[in-house]
Image: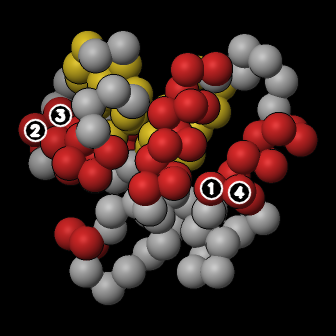
Amino acid sequence: MVGKEGSWNGDSLRNAIRENIHEGAQIFLDYDGTVVPIIMNPEDSFPAEKVQELLSVISKKYDLYVVSGRSIEDLEKFLGPDLNFIAMHGACARIGGNIRYLKENYPDYV
């Protein structure tokens, strides 16, 4: 299922979802190592266009969350503003466009 570089490619992700996920399910995908391969320079971790398009399609049908230790701002830079994110190792999230701080001491995670 995993693409050549160790991350999901558009076809493998689409097939995995089609075969294993039922309507209305929640899907949580880790950014580094799942949506994109782990690379030497994390600032260059942009997903392939086909993967971005697929994430957009998936988010319209399922409750999709991209999970990461990265900040919401970093995730927006790579994926745009329309997806749900759980960021900073769970310290904050952006769900439905609204940012929620899930830890009282959120600044300590930055």
Q: Which residue lies furthest to the right in this view?
A: 19
Q: Distance between the residues labelled 2 and 4?
A: 38 Å
Disc with the residue nearer the chain's start (1 vs 3): 1
Q: Distance between the residues labelled 1 and 3?
A: 34 Å
Q: Where is residue 2 in the image (x, y as percent from the top left)?
A: 71, 69
Residue that mark 4 sits on? 11
Disc with the residue nearer the chain's start (1 vs 2): 1
Q: Mark 3 falls on what kind of element? A: helix
Taking the spot 33% from the left edge, 45% from the top edge, the residue there is: 79
Q: Can residue 88 be seen in this view?
A: no
Q: Which numbered marker is on residue 107?
A: 2
Q: Where is residue 109 in the image (x, y as percent from the top left)?
A: 19, 46
Q: Can residue 65 be seen in this view?
A: yes
Residue 9 left/right relative to 90 = right
Q: Mark 4 falls on what kind of element? A: helix
Residue that mark 1 sits on? 10
Q: Mark 1 falls on what kind of element? A: helix
Residue 22 left/right relative to 5 = right
Q: Which of 56 and 63 is in front in this view?
A: 56
Which-is-in-front pick, marks 4 and 3? Answer: 4
Which picture quadrant has residue 32? bottom left
User: Compared to 80, does 8 lie above or below?
Assistant: below
Disc with the residue nearer the chain's start (2 vs 4): 4
Which picture quadrant has residue 64? top right
Disc with the residue nearer the chain's start (4 vs 3): 4
Residue 98 left/right relative to 28 = left
Amino acid type at circle 1 is Gly
Amino acid type at circle 4 is Asp
Residue that mark 3 sits on? 106
Q: How far apart are marks 2 and 3 (CA)?
A: 4 Å
Q: Residue furthest bottom?
A: 40
